[in-house]
Image (tube, rainbow, N blue to C red):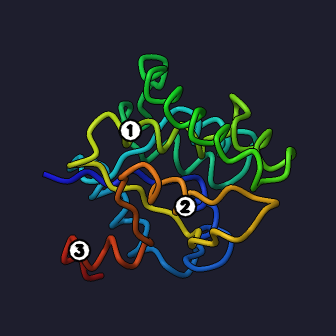
Amino acid sequence: MSVYVVDSNFFIQAHRVSYPFDVATSFWNKVIELAEAGKITSIDKVKNEIFKNDDELKQWCEINLPDNFFKDTSSIIPQYSQVAAWAASKAAHYLPNALAEFLDADEADAWLVAHALTDPAEIILVTYEVSDPNRKNKVKIPDVCLANGVKYCSTIEMLRQLGERF
């Protein structure tokens, strides 16, 4: 069974723009349902990014997501090293600040790809980002996925692949 691993913007973009809590309750109920069924999950680095702000989104996550939703990344150092090596090999393309941000130990993006590399046949990353291989000032998750054999999709694509309606 495929597992969809969501990035920070899955929550942040939905909360702030696309699916506000007070308007799109069925979306958030679907997130709870998918999380409880183990169809979607995320990593501790995403939790840290979301929990930086003591806001409604943090409170919603604390109340509604299963305790095991955010997976620990401490055991995926070999996969992270693979992602970091790929990024280092692109030093001639990306600006130094872009690589520094991408490889910052507190930033989730590289860790998300590393987590997906633990089971690339089953893990699909969910992100709002789109591939932009010519961009030099930001390393985009889809470009790292494409280079490392990791599947990715958008939130809507995920919902379609899961056959979800709400």
- Which sits in the foreground, 165 or 79? 79
- Examine the rendering and report whether any part of residue 119 can be seen: yes
The amino acid type of the residue labelled 3 equals Gln
Query: Is 141 on the left or on the right of 137, as rendered?
Result: left
Is the residue marked by circle 2 packed among few (<14), some (14-19), or many (20+) residues within 10 Å?
A: some
Measured along the vertical axis of the image, is residue 54 above or below residue 29?
A: above
Q: Which of marks 1 and 3 is in front?
A: 3
- Examine the rendering and report whether any part of residue 14 can be seen: no
The residue singled out by tag 2 in the image is 143
Q: Position of residue 11 (x, y in %)?
A: 56, 60
Give the residue drawn at x 61%, y 67%.
Answer: 15
The amino acid type of the residue labelled 2 equals Asp
The Cα–Cα distance between marks 3 and 2, rounded to whole angstroms, is: 21 Å
Earlier residue among tags 3 and 2 = 2
Is the residue marked by circle 3 packed among few (<14), some (14-19), or many (20+) residues within 10 Å?
A: few
Regarding mark 2 in the picture, which secondary structure is present there? helix
Q: Position of residue 137 (x, y in %)?
A: 82, 60
Measured along the vertical axis of the image, is residue 142 above or below residue 22?
A: above
The amino acid type of the residue labelled 1 equals Phe
The residue singled out by tag 1 in the image is 69
- Which sits in the foreground, 86 or 102? 86
Q: Which of marks 1 and 2 is in front?
A: 2
Measured along the vertical axis of the image, is residue 10 above or below residue 6?
A: below
Give the residue drawn at x 53%, y 53%.
Answer: 144
Give the residue drawn at x 12%, y 51%.
Answer: 1
Query: Is 147 on the left or on the right of 109, as rendered?
Result: left
The Cα–Cα distance between marks 1 and 2, rounded to whole angstroms, is: 25 Å
The residue singled out by tag 3 in the image is 161
Is the residue marked by circle 1 packed among few (<14), some (14-19), or many (20+) residues within 10 Å?
A: some
Regarding mark 1 in the picture, which secondary structure is present there? loop
Q: Where is residue 165 in the image (x, y as percent from the top left)?
A: 25, 82
